[in-house]
Amino acid sequence: MKAWQIGDQTGLDSLTLVERDIPIARHGQAVVAIKACGLNHRDLMIVSNRYGGRKPETRIPLSDCAGEVVSVGEGVTNVAPGDRVSATHFTGWIDGAFDPAYFGNDLGNSADGVLAERVVLPAHCLVKLPDNLSDEAASTIPVAGATVWSCVQRLGQVKAGDTVLMLGTGGVSIYALQIAKMNGARTVITSSSDDKLERVRAMGADVTINYRTNPEWDKAVLDEAGGADIVVETAGIATLGQSINACRPNARIGLIGALAGRGEQPNLGGLLLKNLVLKGITSGSRTMLEEFVAAVEVNGFDPVIDRVFAFDEAVEAYEYLESGSHIGKIVIKL
Amino acid sequence: MKVYEIGTQKGIDSLRAAERDEPAAGAGQAVVKFHANSLNYRDYMVLNGWYGGPKEETLIPVSDGAGEVVAVGDGVSDVAVGDRVCISFFSKWMDGPFGPQYFGSDLGGGADGTLAEMGAFPADALVKLPDDWSYADGACLPVAGVTAWNCIMGAGAYQPGQTVLLLGTGGVSIFGVQIGKAKGTNVVITSSSDDKLAKAKDLGADHGINYKSADDWAKAVLEVTDGKGADVIIETGGPGSLEKSFEAAAFNGRIGLIGGLAGQAEGPLNTMPLVGKNLKLCGVTCGSKKMLQDLIDTMVAAKAKPVIDKAFPFSDAAAAFRHMESQAHLGKIVITHD
């Protein structure tokens, strides 16, 4: 069977298409025929060795997928051949709080990922997909969906009438917008592009702010929406000071993803005065992913797929992600 | 009656004595005759003009006070003349989450404080003292005790068996030790003084770390917790402390950010450990009256009393502030009225 490997991790050209043996399901495992894969920003970092150290050259990349179970090993009861499934990328994180051990089994990072015709996975990380979710749509969900659920539902405790602030129009922001709307929340979203803001207004964003033409976007959040109760902080330390300013008292800020990092410390005094909570979030558990899938099964889902590439065009898909010209998700279809 | 006023807010010498009419209890109010106060660092900041800008020179400073109810106004039923009470810091925050409506009701900052012979306060803000507690004991709790309570039990969502880390041996940290022990925690505390660490251990701290002699106190916290780190941290440290707290925290740890100087920009900060360990950084400004009541109930059940470092007479309040300035204390600095 065909599989992509990350190679020597010196950039996108390191991606290598190879031939591998078809995997076999041992005890507790399932073999999944991959139908579609979704890309995330961290996948770019992994192929250029910017994500927690160099990995074996044979590592299969990507963590988001949808596929069909083709065989199961002994002791597997939660899925059966023929089931349409997606996978939790921290394959050991079933429920409860985060544990550092989960980094050891992270698809496309510390464990082989999903950009292959067939992959073998622990059956307990699989989530069944409803009929109204296409393979392409489902393949965009796991990382962004579990992250959004962790941030907006678990940390945010969102309720009708809350105001949820999203920074930028990446996958996490778009899914947070949809979950916030399902909960009856008011949504505020920022972008540097009026075109992108018009598109998110069409998706239900209540207040849109162009942060390039309006650099004091934190004030705009306060003026136009009365401040945020929940912030999906995907931009990192550079925007954290303004995110804190944009909050109402008792707001919850989820600090997400690899864009966090070292920078000038913003004044955190507002955290104190407004009794805010700032929490670091690294994706979520299988339960959170299941809850996200259940929510979009009932409410419908617009995954905003920007472009679909063929399996042979994986490098082009990465290049398109790197260009930053997309809105929403990029998918590779098998 | 005698009161103190904050004056020109240029330091401790700005503190000035004044005479005022005795207060009367309006509807819903009670008049408290003070027997004791305790100091918090915030009171020192107010005297120096460092706490949210200059305030009226006639403001009565200090938020923590305990005394006897000597009069009640119309509609007051929860307290009566003769009750021994202390006063909740945000006099309008009864229960539930914090809200902007409580700003301005903070004693000795937004509203007149307690460094006076008497004061009229909303009766709802008063909490009765246990019978065997002195007024000095009762005066220690409202700010420092409730802040520690909120960091550990509220924002910290502490569970028995977890580790609580306290930085330094100020009033909040010492309450943290006592609450921690009452709730079955592993308590780790830091100080630059081995003497203070020994005293903290007498109060129940499980591990003391001298941050001057230890190369890296964050690493030392990991060592004494078998590599796990602290589940709850009360972040009272100065510049550079926050990044160390991220290092010393356990996965899913909660860090309470407290105090008037907390969180000021102070150079670079690495937030990757915050994300990688799924930490929660919580801004905590004291707490509600309900938390004050819960704290008192917990301390009574644990047979613990506030740790008083030293008491000064009301006639020499400035000496109490100077003692605070010297940083020689462990636990609370008290002012008594006689």
Image (cartoon, coloured by chain):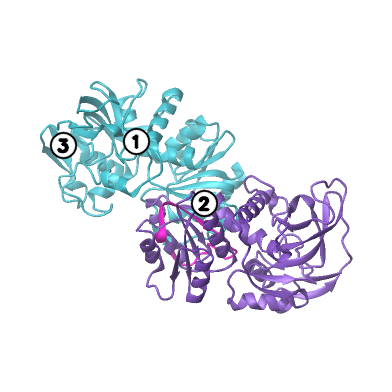
Question: Which mark's residue is nearer the viewer, 2 or 3?
Answer: 2
Where is residue B176, by image quadrant? bottom right
Is mark 1 in CB contact (under 8 Å) with mark 3? no
Q: What residue sits right under mark 3 in the picture?
A: A3
Q: What residue sits right under mark 2 in the picture?
A: B156
> Which sits in the foreground, B161 or A291?
B161
> Which sits in the foreground, A325 or A99?
A99
Q: Is B86 on the left or on the right of B219, as rendered?
A: right
Query: Is residue B328 shown in magenta?
Result: no
Q: Is residue A11 above or below residue B118?
A: above
Residue A253 appearing in the image: yes
The chain under label 3 reads A
- Element assignment for label 2: loop
Q: Colour of chain B?
A: purple
Q: Is B264 on the left or on the right of B332, as rendered?
A: left
Residue at the spot 14% in from the left edge and 33% down from the top edge:
A23
Residue at the spot 72% in from the left edge and 50% down from the top edge:
B92
Q: Give the magenta part as a residue range.
A: B247-268
Query: Chain letter for cyan?
Result: A
Q: Amino acid at mark 1?
A: Pro
The chain under label 1 reads A
Give the CA distance from mark 2 to mark 1.
29 Å
Query: Is residue B253 shown in magenta?
Result: yes
Q: What residue sits right under mark 1 in the picture?
A: A142
Mark 2 vs mark 3: tell me if same chain.
Answer: no
